[in-house]
Image (spheres, helix red, strand yellow):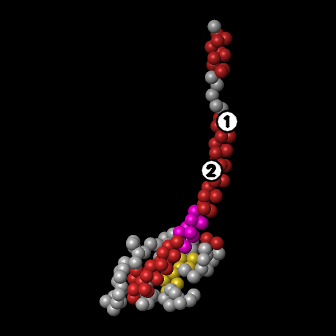
Amino acid sequence: MKNRKVSAFVSERGVTLIEMLVVVVIIGLFVGLVSVNMFKKADEAKRTAAHAQIANFSQALGLYKLDTGTFPSTDQGLQALRVKPDANTSNWNGPYLPQDIPMDPWGRPYLYKYPGDHGDEPDVMSLGADGQPGGEGNNADIGSWSSK
């Protein structure tokens, strides 16, 4: 009778602390490897979003110019796409954007300049992740004059 209880007890053995630690370490390594790739994708997604928003601004600015005959001045900025700049702006038929002007993906306002430095159209830009002019990679400026 005692042998049955002992053998039943041995067959119901639990997981050892070492086995649990090995599993936790493996899961930790897996999470570490996956998270590095996820952060790279997040940075790429922010840059793609900035390009898309700048393209939307450029289209809205084109419609603004068709109606008014000129682009908004630097002082009027992108806000002229949402609110009529002043009484002297004739033929304004906005708003040209369905929502308020968003911040760039890094939480800073887009920069607007007209006349621009890169041709006849206005310059719309984001300063990238670092918020400073210039830079490379994720810190590079994203402008309406440059392609992806």
Q: Where residue 117 appears, x then y in whole percent?
A: 56, 89
Above or below residue 54? Residue 32 is above
| Residue extent of the magenta highlight | 42-51
> For residue 68, what is the image quadrant?
bottom left
Which residue of the protein is positioned furthest toward the front in this rendering? 66
Q: Identity of the amino acid at label 1?
A: Glu
Residue at 52% of width from left, 84% of height from top?
123
Looking at the rendered structure, the secondary structure element under dot 2 is: helix
Name the mark nearer the viewer: 1 or 2: 2
Residue at 67% of width from left, 11% of height from top?
3
Q: Nearer the viewer, residue 114 or 37?
A: 114
Q: Identity of the amino acid at label 2?
A: Val
Q: Residues within 10 Å of mark 1 (few under 14, many from 20)?
A: few
* Residue that badge 1 annotates: 19
Residue at 63% of width from left, 19% of height from top?
9
Looking at the rendered structure, the secondary structure element under dot 1 is: helix
Mark 1 or mark 2, which has the lower sequence index?
A: 1
* Residue that badge 2 annotates: 31
